[in-house]
Structures are given as C-alpha cells and as structure tokens.
C-alpha cells in the first residue's frame, strides 16, 4: 500500500497518527480520520480524482481551498469537494463519472425552521486579519462571531513554515507562520465574548444584514450589526496548453498538502512565478525533501524579496528569469513541462525552449482578493469593513495590522465614540505593504573584529529581528527605520542569535578567534540534519549562489527558542570566509530533458475549467461584438460552472484587454448573493440534509 506521507520535517512536528480504512473506486486505502479527502487520496498516490463530463479530461486537485470544484468525488454516493470534506472511517469514495445515481430515500421530508445566530459583529475569515480584529473586539467584550471554513484558526499562517519579516514587537517577525497562528489562537481563547465557528463556509450575504453559513449539512443564518470581511485571497490562474492536467495546481494548494496535512505531494516539481508566493513555495518543497527542478519568472527579475530568491540559488535551484511556461504534457497526469525565454513583450522566443521531467507544476502568478462578500454588502448599503488580502494583497504581517485597525474602527462605529487608533499603526501598515526597496551590493571585505556577523541582506525590506535579537545591541538600521539595511558595529559575543532568527537566512557568523587561516563560519540551515556529515567537504556559495570554494563541516548547534534553524559550523579558508553565504547540502540531478519546438498555440487553452471553454472560443465571441459577460456566459457557458467564475473571470477580463476592448465598454456579470454551491435540501433546512 502506497504511503506518500512525510516521515520527518526540519520544522514541523511529525508524529504517528491513527489510520482508518476507506476505498476509492474499489481500491482499499487508508487515511487519517478528519483529514481532507483530497489529502488522503494524495497520500495513497492518487492524483487523478475523475474525468470531466464534457470531454473526458482527467480531473484532480487545483485550489485545495474550496474555491473550485475540480476535486469533486462521490463520498458514500453524494458529490463533495474532496479538499473541504473530512475523511471518515469506511468511506466509499468514487470518481464522478457521468450522472451519479441518486441515493434511495424513504420517509417524509421535514423542513424545520432554520436556526438563526445573532451577534454584534460578524467576522468572515480567521486568518491573520480576522484573528487580529477579533482580539481587539474581544478585549472590549464585544459579542463577536468569527467564522472560518477550516477546523483550525490561522488561515494561511498554518501553511507557513518560514520565519516572518516585519517588526518583532508588532507582528511577531522572526517567528514562523505556524507558530504565529498558535500565538493568536491562544490569545483569542482568553476572550470569552468571541465565539469561533470552525468548519463553516460563509456562502451568502443578504440585504437584511444576514449571512448564510454552511456547516457540513447544516444551514444557518447569522444576524449581525457590523460585518468584517477577512476572507483572504485566491490564487490567479495561468492559461497554457495542459494547464488543467492533474499535477498542475497553485502554490497554496501545494502548501496545504505538504505543510498542513504532511503529505509528500510531489517527487519533482517546477514553479512558475517569482514573487514571494512562488519563491517561498519552492523553499517549502525543499524543506519537505522534494526536489525543485527550477523556477521560471516572466520578468527580467524576480518580484519577491531578494533574500527568498537567494535562498533558492544557494540551494542550487535554477532560476529562469525572462521565461514563461509554454505547455504541460502527460498521459492523464503531468509528466513534462516546457518553458521558453520571452522578449520584452512577453512573447516566447523560438529556439529557447527547455523541457523538464516533473510530476508537479506550481502556478504562483499572483493573488486576487476574495472580496465578493465585501462588494455585495456594499451594494446592499450597510456598513462593512475589509481587512487583510480581502482589502489589498500584501504580506501577512500587514494583514495583522490592518485587522487591528479594522477592529478599532468597528468599535468606534458600534459605540459611537472614538477609540484611539495610533497614527503609527497606519504608517506601519503602509511600510509592511511596501514593495522591496533599493538593492545595495558591497564588496564584503570589511573585518570589524575577531568575531562578527556578516550580513548578506542587501535589499531594503521591512524587517528587524536581527536588530532586536542582538544582546549587545550591535546591529542597527539607520534612523531606526524598519525599511533600512541593517549594519554591524560594536561588540559581538558570537552567540549566533542573529544568524538563527533572520527570516531571510541572510546572516553568517565569522569567527577568527581560534584560527586566522581557517576561521569558523556559521551558516543557518533548515533542510534537515541528515545532510550534515562531520568532516565532509561541501561546496560553499556566495550570496548569489555561485560556488566560491569548499569548507569542512565541523559541528552543528541550535538555539532553543528559535526552533527549526540549525547553526552549521564550518572551517572555511580565510580568503572566502566573508563572502561565503551558504553551502550546497546535496547534489542536484537535472530534470531537463531537451528542447521542444513552440508548436501549439494558445487558442486551445482552457480558460473556464468548470465548463471546459477554450481561449479561442472566447476570443471569437469578443471579436463577434460581445461586450456583456452575461451574454458571453449564455453563448459560451464560460463562468457558468460550479466555481461561479471565480477563476476564469479575471482571465476573460485579460482577454478583453488583449483584444483592445476598453473596460468601460464591458458589462460585468450579474453576481447573485450565493457565492458557494449549497445543496437545495441543505439550503431549505431539510432535516438530516447531509444524509439525504
């Protein structure tokens, strides 16, 4: 029996868990009770969940967040989203092939009155923004209902195994996202006025200040005075031939499988997108023991933090800037990915194609706010706030601050008085949202003492853990700015705290006290102790990932309060000690298998996954004069599927722009209040709706 689960992880605690049996298309499998069905299937090596009813194309996981319906399966005869449905013992799972046979039903249908929940403030989303707002409201004993569709609060924090940037005092910088989630959850537990409703999907908001909530097979209405939307973001899609193959999915889906559910979701993967999401997902893959064949970014430079980019380069991951993905291929599931270089207009250049053998392609080309609840409530005319990514796409550190601010604004509105919102909060939010600033390279020749930290962070980003952690107060940022570049001056005890706490793994400790010719250099390392062998010579790299020599591994140590980061101590030749930023822990095997001509055009790319509508059909309709998305839906069925157009609408809007249609000429889709699919029996309050 296949078991694709993580056996260990350098950061996450992997413990033995109980198993239960289930079947998929008659095959006996085992899984962890309560985990998502999709994760249980992946853990059993199952990547293809079914086929599309229109063309028989294979279907698998895509968003892993309940936003689409690509992972639909039949569970005990009923269609469910496998990524949102917990596994139970002895479940009989089957692929959705054609129309399922309706389960037999005998007896009377009972429709009792739908339960109503009341609260002063309703918060949709228990990620960093929603948690921060709930804490502010809870401190003032405001009756608050916090709703989230997951079993644990924390949102995307639960998927983040890296240490956060920002300010230590204000947003727990230097602490891993999974730990920040627990810190916020623990604070919330001390505030009895905040009720948490987990495993509950908000599916609608209505004009009479009510919201529809779906918990399993139970539908309820929440009546509120004030509403905060903290629903986060959904990943953007990218159309290319083969983009719907199982094995092609978003970085967030991958992080859900690996970091939340501890499933080894890939053998070898490729990433498209060089923003922070793509760079971080690639690093998370390496932490989980998954080989990263490469990363492609269409722009000449990666848009994410340089320290994230440099971490990958130092670990031997090839980064292909000015490249995009051309196609994905495979027999029923992903087997090969082809990329090519692009010109300044992002057109692929013939003769530059490169093909890689991989089983997973992560699409990380940006995020869109989950803001339909906010827009609809504004349309209805009642007071609503948005925070975090639902308001503006930014880092989780800024989401916490925007949540705090939103919480106080709601208090002011409720109590008709002025709860003071510190001016510096608004300023810090803007700083934490900031794009990376200037990059300042230095020669790395300074030697300020016998022992000292060597700071390899050369790009201005909002971050200060190295400053606040130094016991000698010898690391400072000019003008105490959060966005400046840190520098060292003064004494160093050689404790290594700054090396361990740096979120970018961009500080080394150089120690000449024992040996002038072969000083000790301490590197931060988070890919597992099994790669460290005493006395072994390793290639050493500079901050950009170029090999500059070799060093001998001497020993390792850890700082207890900063878990998951190993301090690897090497003997390094003096002439490269200041330049060495890391070491290559393992040899890379190339996944590149040659070049494939450009070939196919984009006209056959699937834009609407639910209805299998190709790009060529949409362009044809636009060129035929259609400017109304409602009419486009009627003609092509695009946006008519189960996801409600969440994935394809931005792609269709992009096609309009590419066809030269001004935005003011486009009539948007008419959006109904119901944003998530709800079985009719459940919506009507049918007693025992989950079973019937």
Image (tube, rainbow, N blue to C red):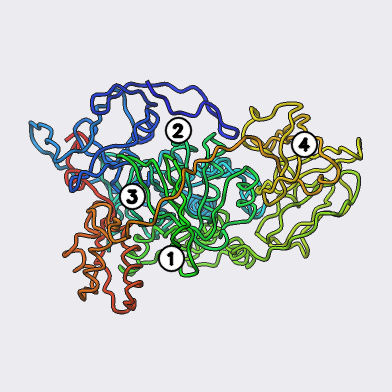
User: Which corner quadrant of the image does residue 225 belong to?
Assistant: bottom left
Residue at the (50%, 69%) spot, across then down: 344
Residue at the (34%, 56%) spot, across then down: 599
Choose mark 1 or mark 4, whichever is in front.
1
Mark-to-mark CA distance, 3 and 2? 24 Å
Query: Is 514 positioned to the left or the right of 545 in the image?
Result: right
The label number, if any, that marks residue 242 in the structure image:
3
Regarding mark 4 in the picture, which secondary structure is present there? strand
Q: Residues within 10 Å of mark 4 (few under 14, many from 20)?
A: many
The label number, if any, that marks residue 347 in the structure image:
1
Check if mark 1's residue and mark 4's residue have beta carbons within 8 Å. no
Query: Is 490 positioned to the left or the right of 484 in the image?
Result: right
Regarding mark 2 in the picture, which secondary structure is present there? loop
Q: Could you tell me which quadrant the C terminus lies in?
A: top left
Mark-to-mark CA distance, 1 and 4? 43 Å
Precedes in sequence: disc 4 or disc 2: 2
Mark-to-mark CA distance, 4 and 3? 44 Å
Regarding mark 3 in the picture, which secondary structure is present there? loop
Task: Point out residue 217 in the picture as x, y percentages from the top left corner.
Answer: 25, 39
Query: Mark 4 highlights which residue?
Result: 551
Q: Residues within 10 Å of mark 1 (few under 14, many from 20)?
A: some
Precedes in sequence: disc 4 or disc 3: 3
Total labels drawn: 4
Query: Mark 2 highlights which residue?
Result: 263
Q: Is residue 217 above or below residue 641?
A: above
Query: Is 359 positioned to the left or the right of 162 in the image?
Result: left
């Amino acid at each position: 029996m296949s078991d694709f689960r993580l056996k260990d992880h350098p950061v996450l605690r992997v413990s033995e868990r109980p198993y239960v049996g289930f079947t998929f298309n008659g095959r006996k499998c085992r899984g962890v009770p309560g985990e998502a069905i999709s994760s249980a299937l992946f853990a059993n090596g199952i990547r293809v969940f079914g086929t599309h009813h229109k063309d028989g194309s294979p279907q698998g996981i895509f968003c892993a967040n309940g936003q689409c319906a690509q992972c639909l399966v039949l569970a005990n005869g009923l269609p469910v989203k496998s990524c949102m449905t917990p596994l139970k013992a002895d479940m009989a799972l089957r692929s959705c092939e054609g129309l399922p046979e309706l389960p037999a039903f005998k007896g009377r249908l009972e429709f009792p009155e739908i339960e109503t929940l009341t609260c002063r403030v309703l918060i949709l989303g228990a990620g960093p923004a929603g948690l921060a707002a709930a804490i502010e409201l809870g401190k003032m004993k405001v009756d608050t209902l916090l709703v989230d569709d997951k079993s644990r609060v924390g949102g995307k924090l639960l998927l983040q195994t890296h240490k956060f940037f920002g300010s230590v005092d204000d947003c727990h910088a230097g602490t891993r996202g999974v730990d920040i989630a627990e810190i916020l959850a623990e604070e919330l537990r001390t505030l009895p006025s905040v009720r948490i409703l987990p495993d509950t999907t908000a599916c609608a908001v209505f004009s009479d200040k009510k919201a529809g909530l779906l918990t399993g097979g139970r539908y309820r209405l929440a009546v509120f005075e004030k509403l905060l939307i903290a629903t986060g973001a959904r990943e953007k899609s990218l159309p290319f031939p083969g983009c719907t193959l199982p094995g092609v999915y978003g970085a967030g889906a991958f992080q859900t499988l690996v970091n939340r559910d501890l499933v080894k979701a890939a053998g070898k993967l490729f990433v498209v997108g060089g923003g922070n999401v793509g760079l971080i997902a690639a690093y998370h893959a390496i932490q989980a023991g998954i080989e990263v064949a490469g990363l492609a970014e269409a722009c000449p430079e990666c848009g994410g933090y340089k320290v994230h980019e440099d971490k990958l380069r130092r670990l031997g991951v090839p980064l292909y800037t000015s490249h995009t993905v051309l196609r994905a291929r495979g027999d029923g599931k992903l087997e090969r990915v082809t990329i090519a270089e692009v010109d300044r207009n992002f057109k692929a250049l013939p003769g530059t194609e490169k093909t890689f053998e991989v089983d997973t392609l992560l699409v990380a080309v940006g995020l869109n706010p989950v803001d339909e609840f906010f827009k609809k409530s504004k349309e209805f005319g009642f007071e609503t706030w948005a925070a975090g990514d639902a308001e503006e796409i930014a880092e989780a550190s800024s989401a916490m601050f925007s949540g705090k601010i939103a919480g106080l604004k709601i208090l002011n509105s409720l109590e008709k008085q002025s709860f003071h919102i510190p001016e510096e909060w608004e300023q810090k939010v803007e700083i934490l949202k900031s794009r990376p600033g200037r990059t300042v390279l230095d020669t790395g020749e300074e030697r300020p003492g016998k022992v000292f930290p060597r700071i390899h962070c050369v790009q201005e980003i909002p971050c200060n853990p190295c400053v606040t952690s130094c016991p000698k107060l010898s690391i400072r940022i000019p003008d105490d700015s959060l966005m400046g570049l840190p520098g060292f001056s003064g004494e160093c005890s050689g404790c290594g705290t700054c090396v361990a706490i740096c979120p970018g793994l961009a500080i080394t400790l150089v120690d000449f006290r024992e040996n002038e010719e072969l000083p000790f250099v301490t590197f931060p390392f988070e890919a597992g102790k099994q790669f460290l062998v005493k006395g072994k010579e390793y290639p050493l790299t500079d901050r950009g990932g170029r090999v500059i020599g070799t060093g001998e591994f001497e020993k390792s140590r850890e700082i207890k309060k900063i878990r998951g980061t190993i301090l690897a101590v090497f003997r390094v030749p003096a002439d490269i000690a200041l330049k060495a930023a890391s070491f290559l822990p393992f040899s890379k095997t190339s996944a590149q298998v040659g070049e494939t001509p450009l070939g196919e055009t984009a006209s056959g790319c699937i834009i609407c996954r639910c209805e299998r509508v190709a790009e060529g059909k949409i362009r044809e309709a636009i060129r035929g004069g259609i400017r109304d998305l409602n009419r486009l839906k009627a003609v092509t069925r695009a946006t008519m599927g189960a996801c409600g157009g969440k994935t394809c609408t931005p792609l269709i809007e992009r096609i309009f722009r590419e066809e030269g249609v001004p935005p003011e000429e486009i009539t948007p889709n008419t959006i109904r209040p119901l944003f998530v699919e709800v079985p009719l029996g459940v919506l009507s309050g049918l007693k025992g709706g989950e079973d019937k």
